Image (tube, helix red, strand yellow):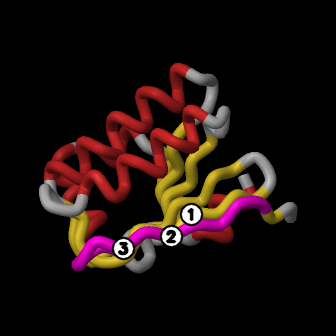
Amino acid sequence: MERGTVGSANRGRLRVAVRTEGQSEIVTPAGELDHHTAELLREPLENALEAGRARLVIDCSALDFCDSTGLNVLLGARLKAEAAGGGVHLAGMQPVVARVFEITGAEAVFTVHESLEAAMEE
């Protein structure tokens, strides 16, 4: 796989790493995604879309918590990515995070993968 740009940001309870592999922008939030930290995830997602990367893979394996604000960030990115001919793929969700998507019905609008490896194979 091709490796491209790599970056990261940190705001207390959330760290976000970003890298490009092939046609995918892989965004890895680690920690708690909530009202106070959501902007830290929104920025790299919007930057990727503005740069023409419409296939966003969110590696959720290190995400410990996601509230409605975090969910809205991901839903907004999904709409923009789909409008650009791409999509948002969620990978490796922890049970507590997956439960938020299940309760809200949001799991039905995302492509969900068991692992990052599975998301990259598609």
Q: Position of residue 47 (x, y in %)?
A: 52, 42
Find out whether the residues at labels 1 and 2 contact each other: C-beta distance under 8 Å: yes
Q: Position of residue 76 (x, y in %)?
A: 34, 34
User: In the image, is residue 6 above or below residue 72?
Assistant: below
Find out whether the residues at labels 3 and 2 contact each other: C-beta distance under 8 Å: yes
Residue 69 lies in the magenta stretch: no
Mark pair 3, 2: CA separation = 7 Å
Q: Quickly name the residue at label 3.
A: 10
Q: Is residue 69 left or right of residue 119?
A: left
**Does the rendering let one see residue 2?**
yes
Q: Residue at x 52, y 61 (%)?
A: 27
Badge 3 amino acid: Asn
User: In the image, is residue 4 above or below residue 9?
Assistant: above
Name the residue at the top extreme. 83
Q: Quickly name the residue at label 1.
A: 18
Q: Residue at x 27, y 67 (%)?
A: 97
